[in-house]
């Protein structure tokens, strides 16, 4: 039977197979003309898919590894590990990640393959924490890329195109506590006049908006235990737990109201035990250079009425720059403009060109794991190292074993 992605927005064309050993994995790679790795299935399009006569490899039956190197301050973790499990184990050992995505349900290898990120002006994406990768290459042989390997910056945000990643080595920091507070109704004039200060008023800050009305509906601020409590007045501090999607179950969100708690229970917006976000949805996101953020904000607000029928909520957050060739934050800090849409594929594809018409000229780069309508030419203009990535791909996968329709269409 055909299997679907998490949102039910894509049905995979090939069967999903779960190798139990690296030898089995290598045989599956060389035994098929086309092969792709599947993570926790949280991307929204055909990105992970392969040809109908190919095979999708889910690595969740491989042996699990979580090994902290205290001297190097890294953790080496099997690719299929979910961030929820990694967070619990790191915290137990006194260690932490500097960032997490909005949900802890993602697999580590799948998240870094698309440049997945959280928020924070000084905080880079999860992909930027990668110090090493191990995997099975197109020839079925095991490979290892260390921190100094010149191929590493091109091989992290690699869209599954360079190999099946079996372990990922990530930077860790000593464990820390955070408090999460939500502020309600930050007037738009305050937001636009002090955008930089608002986005920087905590360790990790997210604006949630419908783009309509006089105010940003919610500002979620995650602050380090020793930081001063931000004052976002004239916004009001929420006195009860809120969900960013109107009417959704507040039991699904991580603890708010300023209660201190461990990093992995505050950085994600959603609890591991609950369904994150809305479930039946699509998502899009664009990374805009930080110095064009206000222009982008104004441009998207101008579309508020067109977006409203499809939009569940938008999130605006920040990501620090990195050196990864296909990262949305390659060589510069960015502000990310995210859209959680109703699951209306045609409707979303009809409004995205309007959004992109305004954001791409500002230097925006689409999130690889979400829905966009940007073309091959748009992507070539937005991602300056795309040609270098193509060369790397030709060297590492000369027979295009890890290719698929998404990569054929866009790279
Ligand atoms: C509710 C929800 C909230 C989200 N929140 C955020 C967020 O806060 N920030 C953000 O940036 N994104 C967010 N996303 C998007 C999500 O992080 C990305 O789509 C991510 O890539 C999904 O990881 P996955 O493990 O599900 O990978 P999949 O969707 O299964 O695969 C994604 C890509 O990774 C590749 N891949 C997977 N495993 C491997 C492997 N072992 N080796 C090589 N390649 C591999 C696949 O081939 C594919 O190309 C969210 C998505 C959802 C559904």
Image (cartoon, rainbow, N blue to C red):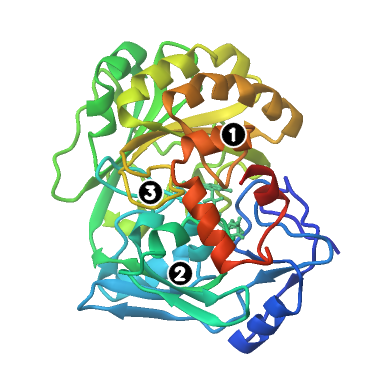
- Which numbered disc, 2 or 1, marks the residue closer to the eye? 1
**Residue under pointer 2:** 85
**Residue under pointer 1:** 377
Image quadrant assignment for residue 86: bottom left
Q: Looking at the picture, does residue 107 appear above or below residue 372?
A: below
CA distance for labels 2 and 3: 18 Å
Where disc 3 sits, the SS reads loop
Count of marks overlaid on the render: 3
Disc 1 crowd, CA 10 A, few/some/many (<14, 14-19, 20+): few
CA distance for labels 2 and 1: 39 Å
Residue at left offset 54%, top offset 15%:
304
Residue 56 on image: x %, y %:
71, 67
**Residue under pointer 3:** 255
- Which numbered disc, 2 or 3, marks the residue closer to the eye? 2
Q: Is residue 105 visible?
A: no
Tell which of 147 and 281 is nearer to you: 147
Q: Is 168 left or right of 341, judged from the image as shown? A: left
CA distance for labels 3 and 1: 43 Å
Q: Is 159 left or right of 69, judged from the image as shown? A: right
Ligand 1 lies in which image quarter? bottom right
Residue at left offset 35%, top offset 69%:
149
Q: Quadrant of the N terminus?
A: bottom right
Where disc 1 sits, the SS reads helix
Q: Is residue 404 visible?
A: yes
Residue 130 on image: x %, y %:
37, 63
- State if disc 3 and disc 2 touch (CB < 8 Å): no
Image quadrant assignment for residue 228: top left
Mark positioned earlier in the residue sequence (2 or 3): 2
Q: Is 106 left or right of 261, judged from the image as shown? A: right
- State if disc 1 and disc 3 touch (CB < 8 Å): no
Residue 39 on image: x %, y %:
60, 63
Residue at left offset 72%, top offset 45%:
9
């Amino acid at each position: 039977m055909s299997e679907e992605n998490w949102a039910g927005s894509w049905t995979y064309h090939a069967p999903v197979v779960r190798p139990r050993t690296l030898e089995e994995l290598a045989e599956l790679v060389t035994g098929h003309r086309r092969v792709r790795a599947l993570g926790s299935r949280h991307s929204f399009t055909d990105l992970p898919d392969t040809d109908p006569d190919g095979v999708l490899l889910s690595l969740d039956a491989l042996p699990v590894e979580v090994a902290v190197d205290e001297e190097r301050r890294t953790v080496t973790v099997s690719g299929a590990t979910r961030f929820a499990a990694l967070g619990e184990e790191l915290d137990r050992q006194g260690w932490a990640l500097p960032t997490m995505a909005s949900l802890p349900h993602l697999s580590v290898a799948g998240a870094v393959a698309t440049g997945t990120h959280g928020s924070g002006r000084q905080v880079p994406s999860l992909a930027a924490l990668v110090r090493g990768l191990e995997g099975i290459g197109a020839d079925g042989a095991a490979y290892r890329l260390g921190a100094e390997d010149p191929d590493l910056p091109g091989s992290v945000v690699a869209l599954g195109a360079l190999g099946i990643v079996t372990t990922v080595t990530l930077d860790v920091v000593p464990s820390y506590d955070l408090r999460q507070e939500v502020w309600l109704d930050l007037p738009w004039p305050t937001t636009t006049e002090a955008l930089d200060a608002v986005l920087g008023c905590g360790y990790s800050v997210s604006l949630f908006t419908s783009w309509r009305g006089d105010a940003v509906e919610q500002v979620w601020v995650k602050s380090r235990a020793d930081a001063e409590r931000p004052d976002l007045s004239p916004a009001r501090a929420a006195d009860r737990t809120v969900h960013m999607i109107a009417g959704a179950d507040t039991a699904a969100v991580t603890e708010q109201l300023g209660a201190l708690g461990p990093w992995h229970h505050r950085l994600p917006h959603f609890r591991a035990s609950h369904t994150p976000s809305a479930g039946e949805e699509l998502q899009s996101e664009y990374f805009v250079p930080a110095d064009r953020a206000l222009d982008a904000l104004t441009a998207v607000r101008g579309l508020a009425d067109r977006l409203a029928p499809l939009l569940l909520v938008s999130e605006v957050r920040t990501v620090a720059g990195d050196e990864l060739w296909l990262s949305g934050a390659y060589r510069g800090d960015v502000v990310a403009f995210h859209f959680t849409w109703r699951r209306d594929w045609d409707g979303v594809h009809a409004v995205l060109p309007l959004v992109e018409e305004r954001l791409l000229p500002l230097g925006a780069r689409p999130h690889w794991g979400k829905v966009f309508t940007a073309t091959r030419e748009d992507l070539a203009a937005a991602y300056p190292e795309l040609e270098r990535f193509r060369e790397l791909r030709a060297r590492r996968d000369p027979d295009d074993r890890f290719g698929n329709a998404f990569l054929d269409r866009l790279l």
